[in-house]
Image (cartoon, rainbow, N blue to C red):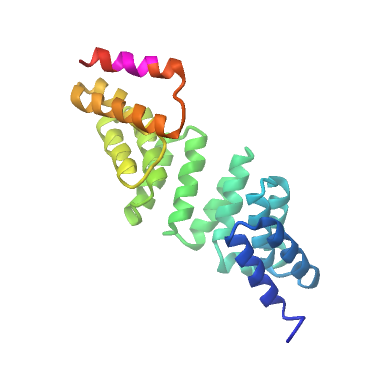
Amino acid sequence: LNPRFHDAYFFVGRTAFERADYQNALKIFRHVLDYKPDKGNYRFFMARTLEAEGRATQALEEYRKATAVDPAFGIENPMIYVFRGRLLSKLNYSREGKADIARALELAPKNVDALLAMGDSEFRDHNYKDAIVHYDAALAIDPIRPDAQARLGMCLLFMERRPEAAQRLQLAIKYGHEDPEAFKRLGYLYKDMGQRAQAREAFTKFLEKAQEKGDVPGATKREIMGQLEDLR
């Protein structure tokens, strides 16, 4: 009815993106950007699609263009700073990444994703004390974040706060954290704390979960079997 209704094309692209049909999404986003190059939300989803495709450098360029061509978009949509900050941190531009995430937190201080992104950035930089502050703030608002609970548990472990670390790893597992390594970490934690029954249970669960995901390396299996033998 209206071939120039670019928002309609854009939402067809959004649908393709949500269905992980990234090739088609990119084709559509390129089309609408040919006509509306100054639309921040068009560039934002172009960037997200490129990032999902593993094209990090091109994605970063589009994230930057989104706020450059449409400054109001960033103010109204702080999540762009979260996505851009995360990508910058992953690309080892830690300072720039944290600056973007800090900008998101200025605009939305209780944004859980921004708090978690800052925690992840500090965790990546081994600043565990600062990471704990941000993870605690985020999980106080939304505790059902299993991977964040696991990373908080690791921060607490590195800070030698063992009982709290064990509690967070247990919460991560309860909420659906799927990495078998959480059980392995718990096994060693409980063993260090003298809780032998809990350690045996955690090591046994590690073997079960790891085998479900595929073959357990021989060295790892021998290591855990040795721990179970020691805990008999």
Question: Does residue 17 appear anywhere in the picture?
Answer: yes
**x and y percent of residue 6 in the render?**
72, 76
Q: Is residue 7 left or right of residue 146?
A: right
Q: Nearer the viewer, residue 144 or 63?
A: 144
The residue stretch that appears in magenta: 222-227
Q: Nearer the viewer, residue 56 or 157?
A: 56
Q: Quadrant of residue 90?
A: top right
Q: Quadrant of residue 65?
A: bottom right
Tell me which residue sits at (49%, 47%) in the image.
118
Tell me which residue sits at (39%, 34%) in the image.
155
Above-or-below relation of 51 to 232: below
Q: Quadrant of the C terminus?
A: top left
Tell me which residue sits at (32%, 27%) in the image.
160
**Count of numbered labels shown in the rendering:** 0
Q: Is residue 184 left or right of residue 83?
A: left
**x and y percent of residue 144 in the render?**
35, 52
Question: Does residue 96 appear anywhere in the picture?
Answer: no
The outermost residue toward the right is 34
Tell me which residue sits at (40%, 34%) in the image.
212
Q: Is residue 161 left or right of residue 85?
A: left
**x and y percent of residue 36 in the render?**
76, 72
Q: Magenta span: helix, strand or loop, mainly?
A: helix
Q: Is residue 161 left or right of residue 93?
A: left
Q: Is residue 4 magenta?
A: no
**x and y percent of residue 39 in the render?**
70, 70
Q: Nearer the viewer, residue 220 or 43?
A: 220
Q: Quadrant of the N terminus?
A: bottom right
Q: Quadrant of residue 227?
A: top left
